[in-house]
Image (cartoon, rainbow, N blue to C red):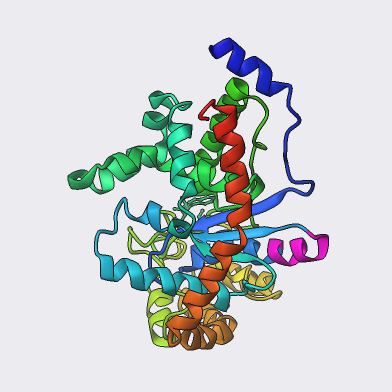
């Protein structure tokens, strides 16, 4: 049976899209932080724009099923789904030029994830660094979803046969696992899915305000780019700088200072700012104040757009419904092909 099943479908031509599709997902965890934007969302927008000129599809998803592994408050979940959708649009996603939808509005993905479970050795999942990390972060709630999380992520991507995945570096182990799952599936049932590839920005890992760990809401070291200016000021002023620069007159080391590194993304004059630090012409406080004002100014338009969008949940819901409908034919075609390859009818 196994030999037959793997031999015959392999001969079929793969039904891959001519131009590789783009796909990425983000959890509905409230307003995005600077790490989300510099590490991933900027690339969602850049790839959406590129895709629009090249006639290919860019698909972005608010992954509520994934968030259920740690968000258990239904009211909060509903609100945060809409907030994340609003934030993505405010930061530059244009629902006319890309598809924006909510993961659970295209439930085919759960079927594909189950089918992928059957080609994924449990050892691969147990070894995933993010599983080990999450198990430690929420020891009182080590649900099965934490273990099979990357299988659902693989299904997210290839349900749409997407091959380019803009993500931050923290998602690299998940993407590698997606590739392995695709290889395992293709080897057993014939060439069906493309192997997805990560697309990184120039800031694939953004450190948090502590200057040592990756910026993350669960650690509480974030800069909330769509927050009120005073909140941004407070968060930026709390940033750890070069720990060896004790006195104001000590020369700074911009290469290791997180504040200096962030200036790279908020002005072409960052080299001058670095020079000021190196020569102790400027102090850490000056550099932080400047960074806070630049972040506030950079996201001012997005902050206003976010406020308007969140005030109109009906409009947001309509955009998301339209997105889920638009990609229904792709999801249905993939599932029909997969079921046939696996002998399910
Ligand atoms: P999530 O919601 O944690 O993060 C969304 C995106 O932001 C990036 N990111 C960062 N990049 C650089 N520095 C940081 N400090 C930082 N923090 C977050 C993440 O790398 C990510 O790209 N499992 C995913 C969601 C997901 C997904 C997918 C992604 C579900 N299905 C399919 C791609 C394709 C996650 O939890 O991302």
Q: Residue 51, position in %: x, y?
A: 75, 61
Give how far across and how far down residue 122 sits, in percent.
Answer: 38, 26
Is 329 rendered above or below residue 111? below
In the figure, 231 relative to 88: above or below? below
Task: Write down the quadrant of residue 326 in the picture.
Answer: bottom right
User: Which residue, as the protein is rendered here, is positioned at the far left?
Assistant: 140
Q: Nearer the viewer, residue 187 or 273?
A: 187
Q: Position of residue 22 (x, y in %)?
A: 66, 53
Q: What secondary structure is the stretch in magenta mostly built from?
A: helix
Read off the magenta span.
47-55
Nearer to us in this view, 169 or 326: 326
In the drawing, does residue 241 fall left or right of residue 266?
left
Does the stretch in magenta take in 222? no
At x 38%, y 64%, the residue is 29
For residue 251, side relative to residue 97 (left or right):
left
User: Which of the pair 271/249 is nearer the observer?
Assistant: 271
Q: Quadrant of residue 175?
A: top right
In this view, the residue farthest toward the front is: 345
Number of numbered discs overlaid on the protein picture: 0
Which residue is found at the position 32% from the left and 66% from the top? 77
Up/down of 76 relative to 190, above or below: below
Residue 157 spot, x, y in % from top left: 57, 47
Q: Nearer the viewer, residue 252 or 330?
A: 330
Query: Which residue is at 78% across, 49% downward?
Result: 19
Say whether residue 249 is visible: no
Question: In this rendering, does residue 148 appear at all?
Answer: yes
């Amino acid at each position: 049976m196994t030999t037959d099943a793997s031999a015959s479908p392999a001969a079929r031509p793969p039904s891959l899209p001519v131009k590789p599709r783009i796909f990425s997902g983000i959890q509905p965890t409230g307003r995005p932080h600077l790490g989300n934007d510099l590490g991933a969302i900027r690339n969602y927008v850049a790839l959406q724009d590129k895709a629009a000129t090249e006639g290919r599809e860019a698909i972005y998803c608010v992954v509520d099923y994934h968030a259920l592994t740690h968000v258990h408050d239904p009211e909060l979940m509903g609100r945060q789904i809409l907030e994340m959708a609003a934030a993505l649009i405010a930061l530059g996603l244009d629902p006319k030029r890309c598809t924006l939808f909510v993961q659970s509005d295209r439930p085919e993905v759960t079927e594909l994830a189950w089918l992928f479970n059957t080609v994924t050795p449990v050892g691969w999942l147990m070894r995933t660094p993010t599983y080990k990390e999450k198990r430690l972060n929420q020891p009182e709630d080590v649900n099965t979803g934490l273990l099979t999380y990357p299988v659902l992520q693989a299904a997210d991507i290839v349900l749409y046969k997407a091959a380019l995945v803009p993500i931050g570096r923290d998602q690299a182990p998940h993407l590698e696992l997606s590739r392995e799952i695709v290889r395992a599936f293709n080897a057993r049932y014939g060439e069906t899915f493309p192997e997805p590839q990560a697309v990184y920005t120039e800031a694939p890992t953004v450190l948090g305000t502590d200057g040592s760990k990756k910026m993350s809401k669960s650690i509480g070291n974030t800069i909330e780019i769509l927050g009120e200016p005073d909140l941004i000021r407070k968060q930026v002023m709390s940033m750890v700088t070069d720990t060896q620069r004790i006195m104001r007159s000590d020369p700074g080391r911009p290469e290791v200072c997180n504040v200096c590194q962030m200036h790279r993304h908020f002005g072409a004059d960052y080299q001058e700012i670095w020079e000021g630090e190196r020569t102790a012409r400027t102090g850490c406080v000056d550099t932080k104040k400047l960074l806070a004002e630049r972040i506030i100014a950079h996201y001012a338009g997005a902050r206003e757009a976010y406020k308007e969008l969140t005030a109109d949940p009906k409009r947001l819901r309509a955009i998301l419904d339209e997105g889920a409908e638009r990609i229904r034919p792709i999801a249905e075609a993939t599932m029909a092909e997969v079921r046939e390859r696996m002998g399910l009818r």
